[in-house]
Amino acid sequence: MSPKIKIPAAALISLGLLYLIWGSTFLSVRILLSYFPPLVITFSRNLFAGSLLLMWSLIGRHWVSMPWKHLSIHLQAGVLLICLGNGFMAMAGSIIPSGFSSVFMALGPLLLVFFFWMSGRKPTQRKLLGTLLGLIGIGIMVSQKKLAIPGMELEFFKGIFYLSVAVIGWNIGVFRIQFTQANSYHFTQVCSIQMLTGGIIVFLISTLKGDYQHIVLADIPIKAFYVFLYLGLIGSMLGYSLFGYLSKELDATLVATYTYVNPLIALILGHLILQEELTKILILASFFILLAVVLITTDKSKPE
């Protein structure tokens, strides 16, 4: 009988916090979309959190010299994770309910199976089964226009396109980082590089679009600024910090459980706070997708 692995209490608490924090970011973005354009939300949260992480890295003496081949990976990750991942997810938020978006974004592990397969690492039968179940779940979701935010049914497939770009961009970024040795640096350094790179690019795009013309500060309630502080400090800065800590303390498969717990948190919060409807079809699709993610992330067998 193999000995049980004792998990530190601090790690368990951190994992629980990560579930709650990253599960709530979808709701936070959805609330802020009532007051700010999506790209403004994206660059603001990342420039804010990225600047704080940069100061943390410098003051804490975690910043070290990084060769160009590694720096270029993180600059690219800034585009993929922040511009495409965060940016397009925020753009979808005005069309697609937060719970729906969170379930769709949980497709990450399925995409990683495909990316690894294309790179020559054949998936196991368990991972293939999980991928098939995930595709069934997505097929159910994208066939239901009524799952859009009321009044946005005609924009439903635009929202699906935005979410597709977000989840593909995010996971290409994760894939590229995992396939290099560029992730051996302190998380405050790499996260600040990624956030500031993506945040600056989205800021320039938003400025060229004239997004500021749609903001009337006098009409924005104080609660919106509280939500923004939560998204920047808790959702971005603390969330990434917890993820970096957990990645060193726990097995990767245990850390990856946030992928299928977050949607459950987001669905519940969206229903309780924004009265987003939990339809039977959404619950069915969520079941297929989350079961798929569980199969993939808990597969400990070696690929062929």
Image (cartoon, rainbow, N blue to C red):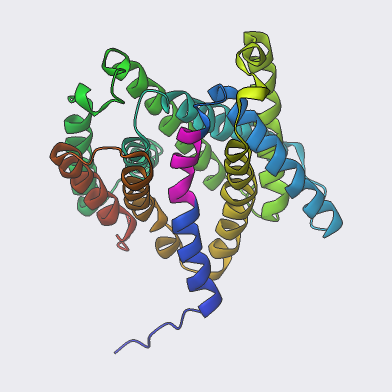
Which residue is drawn at the image coordinates 35% and 16% (left, top)?
158
Residue closest to the eye, 57 or 152: 152
Span highlighted in magenta in the image: 22-31
Magenta segment: does it hold 29? yes
204 up-or-down from 163: above or below: above
Residue closest to the eye, 73 or 291: 291
Which residue is drawn at the image coordinates 60% and 58% (left, top)?
244
Which residue is drawn at the image coordinates 24% and 49% (left, top)?
292
Query: What type of secondary structure mainly makes up the magenta span?
Result: helix
Q: Position of residue 80 (x, y in %)?
A: 55, 31
Q: Position of residue 143 (x, y in %)?
A: 17, 24
185 up-or-down from 191: above or below: below
118 up-or-down from 296: above or below: above
Which residue is drawn at the image coordinates 45% and 38% (left, top)?
171
Quadrant housing residue 218: top right
- On screen, residue 78 versus residue 255, left or right, reads right
| Residue 73 visible at all | no
- On screen, residue 262 versus residue 216, left or right, reads left
200 up-or-down from 13: above or below: above
Q: Position of residue 60 (x, y in %)?
A: 82, 60
| Residue 18 visible at all | yes
Residue closest to the eye, 158 or 257: 158
Quadrant housing residue 303: bottom left
